[in-house]
Amino acid sequence: MAGRMRRWAVATALVVVAGVGVGVAPASAVDPPLPTAPGPMAPPVVAGASSTSLTVAWNPPFNDGDWGGAALQGDPRWAFGAPPAGSANFAWLQHVVHHLAPGGRAGVVLANGSLSSRRSGEGEIRRRLVEAGLVECIIALPGQLFYSTQIPACVWLLAKGRARPDALLFVDARAMGAMIGRTQRALGAAEIVAIAEAVRAWRGEGGPYRDVPGFCRAARLPEVERHGFVLTPGRYVGEATAPAPAEAPAERLRRLSGVLEAQIVEGTRLDAEVLRIVRSFGDGG
């Protein structure tokens, strides 16, 4: 049950980031219960649907090498290339895309390796997904978010029929979160809001969007192509703007001494001026 509740929590967070106005039923309310070990390519968790869209939140096993790929050769879902038998990452992505209705959106949590791997045709599948305009945003997450693994993960936001198919948004949240235990990190509410607002603004659903060095940046397809369709956000967002260097103690002392000296001189001048004015009243009397 604990594992199912964690999956429900991740699905809920994905729905918040996606800006979907629907709820996700807690794992305890699912009838029949979700299997603890789903079969190959089990259906995704559907968070909400209509006649024109389908929203999917999916947190599949990372780098799953026992997903039954050998029995699924030639499957119609592999429109962008056959996923390797040794890893289900691009099987999950294509499975979701296959079931996504026109105008629909999906959020898929995967290991970071899915952003840069080239083994067994994965780089080609990633390129085709990007060129098809299906990859809307990539969010790099910090490590230690999950109980079951310490490795950092990422979120793929997918969309069919989106308004900006020639550009992707990259969000680097690796520096976010705080340790809530010896081995567990959690994102704060304000950090989740910051990520969600960046995505919504870029979609044109919120305030004006702007690139933030070190955090988020929109990149057009030619730039992504120059990077070999590697989608690691750190390649695109750049470095955070460095704060002004702190003033050295000796320099600060010299500066403040100069200010004090100038103030003493000015104070002496004002004292003399006041004394002169007071004496002038006496002379006049």
Image (tube, rainbow, N blue to C red):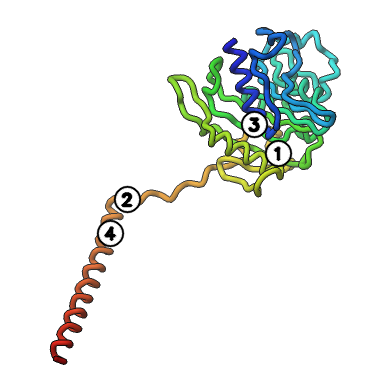
User: Percent from the top left, x then y, of residue 223?
Assistant: 70, 42
Q: CA distance from mark 4 to mark 1?
A: 49 Å
User: Percent from the top left, x then y, of residue 191?
Assistant: 54, 35
> Marks 3 and 4: which is nearer the front?
3
Q: CA distance from mark 3 to mark 4?
A: 50 Å
- Which amino acid is tagged 3? Val
At 65% from the left edge and 8% from the top edge, which residue is drawn?
36
Q: Which residue is mark 3?
A: 16
Nearest to the observer: residue 66 or residue 228: 66
Q: Which residue is mark 2?
A: 248
At 24% from the left edge and 72% from the top edge, which residue is drawn?
266
In the displayed structure, would residue 128 be above or below residue 68? Answer: below
The kind of secondary structure element at disc 2 is loop
For mark 3, does the 10 Å Cα neighbourhood hold few (<14), some (14 to 19), or many (20 or more) residues? some
Quarter location, residue 145: top right
In the displayed structure, would residue 263 be above or below residue 19? Answer: below
Quarter location, residue 142: top right
The kind of secondary structure element at disc 4 is helix
Quarter location, residue 228: top right
Q: CA distance from mark 2 to mark 1?
A: 42 Å
The kind of secondary structure element at disc 1 is strand
> Which mark is drawn over residue 168?
1
In the displayed structure, would residue 32 be above or below residue 212? Answer: above
Sooner in the amino-acid sequence: mark 2 or mark 1? 1
The kind of secondary structure element at disc 3 is helix
Position of the C terminus by quadrant: bottom left
For mark 2, does the 10 Å Cα neighbourhood hold few (<14), some (14 to 19), or many (20 or more) residues? few
